Image: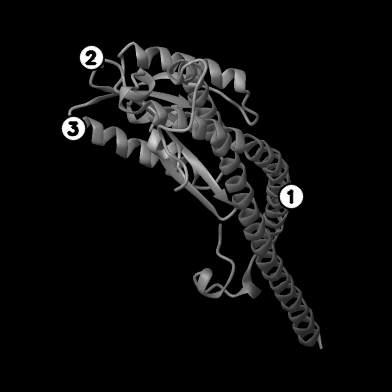
Amino acid sequence: MIPLKGGRTGGIPLDFLPMAQIREIKKRIKAVSTIERITKTMQMVATAKFTSALQRARATRPYTDSIRDLVGKLAASVGDDLENPLINGAMNAESKELLLVVSSDRGFCGAYNSHILRISTRHYKKLAADGMSCELQCSGKKGGAYFGFTGMNVAQQYTFGDKPEFETISEVADELIERFTAGEFTSVRVAYMRYESNARQIPEIMQLLPMKIEEAIELDDSETSATGYEFSPSAEAILEELLPRAVKTSLFQAINDAVVSEQVMRMIAMKAASDNAKGLGRTLKRDYNRARQGKITTELTEIVSGAAALD
């Protein structure tokens, strides 16, 4: 396409733009206007989904924190005698790690997928450099497509959608717990985008198994870990019930945080695209008006010159 103007156009004056060029500008104006309407609509949809996802994530956060706090207190009361594979790891576990990567099913969400896939790839390569194998599992089509392109084998592909169900996450967690306690993995980690605020989302790799009790509890100075409590049934028996539930809720919370982060980043990306389209539309309209005025001036000059020549 012939450039439009001055420094952007290779020095072609607007007065000499052909009519075909002016029609091309008009077509571009219409195309940019259509893009602006589409991105504006996508921004509104992302905003609605973000609001819904944020409500779900905030609703599950107190339960997740409470159950992890309770598990921490129980584990602290048992002390060094605690023996549970979900905390201590399985005996004779293979030198292998499982990494679950939480990506998106759709694009147009800014740098969301690139951040997650970058830290996942870096972690995968670090394990390989340390002589440790890693099994990749992935949630979302974008992550699966990326790993397929780079030649990294994905053992399992999940799709949780914009409204992940706890039952679905629970089934995945049950499988991870079963394989971990059987000694297939030394650890299970989740690469996801942690949501902190609308302006801050942090990609991180969370250790799901074995559970880190020291991160699950912060005792007050007045609390002690081994005195003042009597448990019925025993603390070990209660932990047998609570630990799998804590793993499931932690995974569910991570997935919810990832969905919130995806929607807020899509909302921001679509707003930026709408603003860019609006700015480009204004520039094209200005160039169109200048080109049209230049053609009119040229035609009037030709008419006046022709009339003068006849006289």
Check disc 3 and report its element: helix, strand or loop.
loop
The local crowd at label 3, few if under 14, some if 14 to 19, many if 20 or more residues have their Cα within 10 Å, is few
Residue 177 quadrant: top left
Q: Which residue is mark 1?
A: 37
| Residue at image coords 22%, 30% | 128
| Residue at image coords 74%, 81% | 301
- Compute the Cα span from label 1 to label 2: 59 Å
Question: Comparing marks 2 and 3, which lies closer to the viewer?
Answer: 2
Residue 104 shows up from this direction: no
Q: Determine whether 257 is above or below 139 in the image.
A: below
| Residue at image coords 46%, 42% | 223
Q: Of the residues under marks 2 and 3, which one precedes in the sequence?
A: 2
Residue 184 shows up from this direction: yes
Q: Determine whether 155 is above or below 52 in the image.
A: above
Q: Which residue is mark 2?
A: 92
Number of on-image labels: 3
Pointers 2 and 3 in contact (CB under 8 A)? no
- Compute the Cα span from label 3 to label 1: 50 Å
Task: Please state which of residues 17 and 179 is positioned toward the viewer in this rendering.
Answer: 179
Q: Which residue is mark 3?
A: 130
Residue at the outermost front position: 228
Q: Of the residues under marks 3 and 1, which one precedes in the sequence?
A: 1
Badge 3 amino acid: Asp
